[in-house]
Every structure is written in structure tokens, then in C-alpha cells.
Image (spheres, rainbow, N blue to C red):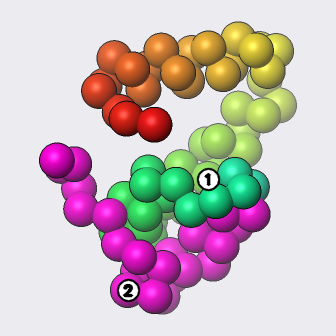
Amino acid sequence: MPRIQPVEPENAPEASQPLMKQGEQAFGQMLNFLKQMAVSPASFQGWWDFNGALQGGSLDQMTHESIYIATSNYNGCVY
């Protein structure tokens, strides 16, 4: 059971809805972690900003994905 209950796009705060659409377009589907982030529009926007900043970093895509998957696995996230 997730600690933060996900919200569907139609039930999300108004400020989160455009971010959810952006996420769905970026990932090709509405992922559960996007639904969880949508609970807090400020946190959701902060995550998007942080994620965007990481895209300009020096890690190659394979390393970035490996760290992402390892962290998700460590935190018990289910795909």
C-alpha cells in the first residue's frame, strides 16, 4: 500500500493537472508516481524542475536510468 494515495487526473488539484498531462506525454502513460506527486502541486512542480535540471548533467542516460531503477528498487517501488 502506498504511503501517499495516488489521485486520478480528474480528481487532482487544478495546479497539478497540466503537470500530469506533461508527465503522461513524457512517459507515454500515466505512471503511479505521477498520480502520487499530483497530491501536492508545489512538490510536483519542484520535482519537474529538478528532473529538468538533471537532464543537463554529465551522467549518460544509461547511468541515470540505472541509478533511478536502483533507488526505486531500494525504496520498494513496484513497476
| Residue 41 falls left or right of residue 75 | right
| Residue 11 falls left or right of residue 19 | left
In percent of width and height, residue 31 lies at: 52, 54
- Residue 40 seen in the figure: no
- Circle 2: residue type: Asn
Residue 42 drawn in magenta: no
Which mark, by number, is residue 58?
none
Quarter of the C terminus within the rendering = top left
In percent of width and height, residue 12 lies at: 41, 81
Q: How many marks?
A: 2
The residue depicted at 83 percent of the width and 31 percent of the height is 56
Q: Which residues are magenta?
A: 1-25
The residue depicted at 66 percent of the width and 22 percent of the height is 65
The local secondary structure at tag 2 comes to helix
Residue to which mark 2 is pinned? 11
In percent of width and height, residue 2 lies at: 22, 48
**Residue 74 appears in which quarter of the rendering?**
top left
Which mark, by number, is residue 48?
1
Front residue of this view, candidates 29 and 14: 29
In percent of width and height, residue 68 lies at: 55, 24
- Circle 1: residue type: Trp
The residue depicted at 65 percent of the width and 73 percent of the height is 21
